[in-house]
Image (spheres, helix red, strand yellow):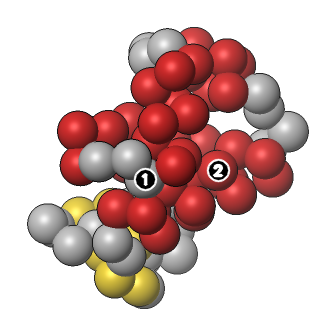
Amino acid sequence: MTYLNIKQLGKLARKLREQASLSQVEAAQIIGSCQSNVSAAEQGKSSRYANVAIKLVQIIGQKSVTGPFFYVQDSLDD
């Protein structure tokens, strides 16, 4: 359980995507977005892409994300 800022959330999203051996294009298809949004979210460019990063963490990483400061739980079951 960790509190993350937008840049940290983006780094986590990228790490989880890479651990799943997915390209940005593949990840975008899974979460219903586009590659450029996944790239921007992983870079933590702005809060505009926070929802994309959250979807990556939730769907690909199977982690729960809540709150304005992105509280990340280790698994969806916690």
Q: Which residue is mark 1?
A: 44
In the image, what residue type sits under mark 1? Answer: Gly
Residue 69 in view, yes or no: yes
Q: Which quadrant is the C terminus positioned in? A: bottom left
Q: Quadrant of residue 55?
A: top left
**Percent coordinates x, y for residue 20 in the rendering:** 79, 44
**Percent coordinates x, y for residue 23 in the rendering:** 77, 27
Q: Is residue 77 above or below residue 20?
A: below
How many circles with numbers are drawn on the protein?
Answer: 2
Q: Which residue is mark 2?
A: 14
* Neighbours of disc 1 within 10 Å: few (<14), some (14-19), many (20+): many
Q: Quadrant of residue 16?
A: bottom right
- Residue under the point 47% across and 69% down: 8
Q: Earlier in the sequence, mark 1 or mark 2?
A: 2
In this rendering, which labeled residue sits more in front, label 1 or label 2? 1
SS at mark 1 in the image: loop
Residue 63 — which label? Answer: none
**Percent coordinates x, y for residue 13 in the rendering:** 56, 52
Considering every residue shown, the one lying at the far left of the view is: 68
- Residue under the point 58% across and 61% down: 11
User: Is residue 34 shown left or right of residue 18?
Assistant: left
- Residue under the point 45% across and 26% down: 37
Q: Is residue 11 above or below residue 44?
A: below
- Residue under the point 23% across and 39% down: 48
Residue nearest the observer in this picture, 48 or 22: 48
User: Is residue 12 shown left or right of residue 15?
Assistant: left
In the image, what residue type sits under mark 2? Answer: Arg
Residue nearest the observer in this picture, 44 or 9: 44
Residue 50 in view, yes or no: no
Q: CA distance from mark 1 to mark 2?
A: 10 Å
